[in-house]
Image (cartoon, helix red, strand yellow):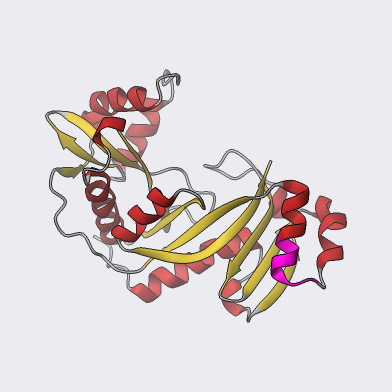
Amino acid sequence: MSPKLSRENIKNITESFYSKFCGTDISALSKGAYFVSSAERENEMRGLGCKYTIYILVKDGLCVVSYSPKYKGAVEPLRNLCADDVIAALNKQFKLKKRRLMVFDNEIISDFRSAKILENADYHLFETFFTTIFPHSNPEGWLYEYFTEKTADGLFTAYVSDNRLLSVCDAPDMPYMAGKIQHTGINTLKDERRKGYAKCAAGLAVKNLLEKGICPQWDCAYENNASAKLAEAVGYREYALAYILEE
């Protein structure tokens, strides 16, 4: 078992993770606006299936605008503007997606009820759950491999009742720092929401990651208040905002 991560470890790993998106070490920056032209923004990111060709991080008076060189003409003229005006100008032109970035702060959940860490033998339950959540998807040829790869590392948790998975936390591939930080994805059956099952599954996911020495990570669309509240309920707090052009 790996040493459990401290709050300071988690903060540092989280900052290193978001620094990868910004193309610069954000922990070394003071308040103000910074502009970073980065060819990295032209790379499709593992686990996300797209490029973040413009990535703006806003945190405690700091604004980092990381952009693909192809957008130099759109970004460079904005250097003398304040952060809000930079975001407004780019949002008007590109319709940026706004996301909440979370940092894990403190373990809150200690009673996980019927939540458990999934094993390879649970695949048939997961397949039923997955096809219920995503009825138009085709799991043929990839879902089993994905599930067994992640469960081999003990990275899936779920709330189980009457031999059914009601809420599942998965572990998507990470674009950066795989094995050091892990995003928690979560889905809950429509008729089983607002019963505390997601909170138990997500709380167990956090505990499991920390015990493996892996930093928990959470982010969600800005308007997804339910996801943000769930994150806070299991010990995350808001870290920053991001404005993203996905291509």
- Determine the image quadrant of residue 216: bottom left
The residue at 13%/43% (across/down) is 114
Q: Nearer the viewer, residue 241 or 185?
A: 241
Q: How many numbered circles are shown?
A: 0
Q: What secondary structure do most residues of the magenta stretch adopt? A: helix
* Residue 154 visible in the picture: yes
What segment carries the magenta color? 81-87
* Quadrant of the rendering where the C terminus is positioned: top right
Quarter of the rendering occupied by the N terminus: bottom left
Horizontal arrangement in the rendering, residue 94 relative to residue 27 (left or right): right
User: Residue 5: image x %, image y %?
Assistant: 32, 68
> Along the line of sight, which residue is nearer the eye, 52 or 187?
187
151 or 133: nearer the viewer: 133
Indicate whether 91 appears above or below 81: above
Does the magenta run of residues contain 82? yes
Classify residue 150 by image quadrant: top left
Drawn side of residue 245 relative to residue 15, left or right: right
Q: Can residue 183 be seen at all in this image of the molecule?
A: no
- Left or right side of 7 for 41: right
On whether residue 42 falls in the magenta region, the answer is: no
In percent of the image, x 60 and y 67: which residue is there? 58
